[in-house]
Image (cartoon, helix red, strand yellow):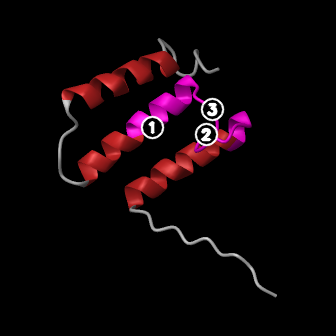
Amino acid sequence: MRRKVEIQLRSTVMHQWADMVETASRAFGVNHKQDGDTPFHRWARALSRIMAVVELGDAPGAELSAEYDEAYTEFFGDEMGDNYE
C-alpha cells in the first residue's frame, strides 16, 4: 500500500507562526493558512512577511511596517479580537 507523506521544513520561528495560525483555524473553524481574506488573514500574512525578513537579518521596510500596522489595527482594534470576521 502506498501512502502520501508530507514533509515540512520550517525554521523555529516559522513553525511558531504556523502553529499559531493552525490553532486559530481550529478555534474559528476557518483554514487561515489558505481560505479567505479576513482581517486575521491580512494580519497573519503581514506578520509572516516580517518574521521572514527579520530571520534573514534585515529590518522590515516602511511599506511592510505600514501594512502590518494597518492589518493589526483592522484585526485587533482597541481590544484584541473585537474586529474578527
- The quadrant of the picture occupied by the C terminus is top right
On screen, residue 60 versus residue 43, left or right, reads left
Residue at screen point 74% across, 37% down:
29
Q: Locate residue 30: give its quadrant.
A: top right
User: Residue 78 at what x, y percent from top left?
Assistant: 47, 11
**Please, is residue 29 above or below residue 51 in the view?**
above
- The quadrant of the picture occupied by the N terminus is bottom right
User: Residue 35 at what x, y percent from top left?
Assistant: 64, 38
Kindly identify which residue carries mark 2.
32
SS at mark 2? loop
What's the residue type where badge 3 is placed? Gly
Residue at screen point 45% across, 37% down:
45
Residue at screen point 27% across, 53% down:
55
Looking at the image, do the residues carrying marks 3 and 2 touch, with CB atoms under 8 Å apart? Answer: yes
Near mark 3 (Cα within 10 A), the count class, few <14, some 14-19 or many ≥20, is few
Kindly identify which residue carries mark 1.
45
Kindly identify which residue carries mark 3.
36
